[in-house]
Image (spheres, rainbow, N blue to C red):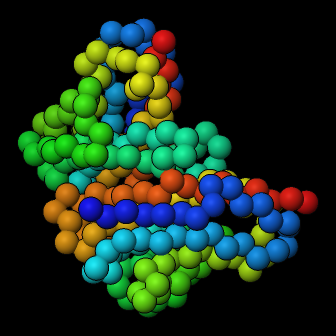
Amino acid sequence: NAGVTQTPKFQVLKTGQSMTLQCAQDMNHEYMSWYRQDPGMGLRLIHYSVGAGITDQGEVPNGYNVSRSTTEDFPLRLLSAAPSQTSVYFCASSYSGGRGYTFGSGTRLTVV
Amino acid sequence: AQSVTQLGSHVSVSEGALVLLRCNYSSSVPPYLFWYVQYPNQGLQLLLKYTSAATLVKGINGFEAEFKKSETSFHLTKPSAHMSDAAEYFCAVRPYNNAGNMLTFGGGTRLMVKP
């Protein structure tokens, strides 16, 4: 089925470890973005991409890196995990013009 | 910068009662507006969207929302709540001129439905 696939679904990290959250879409969407969800704060934008090779920072980019070498993939890297990065992470993809956003099922990350 | 305010982090209604979830945005130019629903341990599902066509937008599961420019509001309603409507609801905006096509979300409203 077409959509956005995120892996892993759950992850526990120790403080200081690094890891990559994977995101892939098969809808040929130009735009992709990463959000984190924390209680009472809705979803906040971490990084986004408007096409292969083009990325930019969102509202809360510190501690995260992204790259977009292909249209399909948009991985999110945690450089040195901190407890403040404990959250649920969602990847989304879309066409332009607000036509619609498709969200992945999320990655629940705990940093201890 | 865009901001979205959802009044009431928790709303409780009885089954069969009217559901009203409030959303106000800040923008001088009407943006695109969305309502998403999130069931426990799941991702976000689009309920409905406003993209400058009809001001009354009908969505899935019997929900609808009305865009009111004068009030900068996009409140979500459903005439009769069902137990299956219990979930968290998010209002989101995308500015009309937004090169990155990003969404700004409200803080969410958790809807509880009492039998």
**Place of residue A82 in the rendered image (x, y in percent of width and height, measured from the top left):** 37, 18
Q: How many marks?
A: 0
Q: Residue at x 39, y 10 (%)?
A: A15
* Residue B34 image-quadrant placement: bottom left
Residue occupying the point 31% across, 74% down: B27
Give coordinates of residue A87: x percent, y percent: 47, 31
The quadrant in which the C terminus of chain B is found is: bottom right
Q: Is residue A49 above or below residue A19?
A: below
- In the visual, does A13 lie left or right of A64? right
Whether residue A105 sits left or right of residue B85 in the image: it is left
Given residues B21 and B39, the one toward you in this image is: B21
| Left or right of A91, for residue A74 | left
Q: Residue furthest right?
A: B115
Residue B30 place in picture, x, y as percent = 32, 80
Residue A27 falls in image quadrant: bottom left
Residue shown at 35% from the left, 85% from the top: B52
Q: Is residue A57 above or below residue B11?
A: above
From the top left corner, tell me how far across and down residue A84 is, in percent. Answer: 42, 25
Residue B88 is at least partly visible in this image: yes
Is residue A90 shown above or below A28?
A: above
Q: Quadrant of residue A75?
A: top left
Q: Position of B16 compared to B100: left or right?
A: right
Quick one: B71 or B17, which is closer to the camera? B71
Is any part of residue A25 visible from this angle? Answer: no
Q: Quadrant of the N terminus of chain B?
A: bottom left
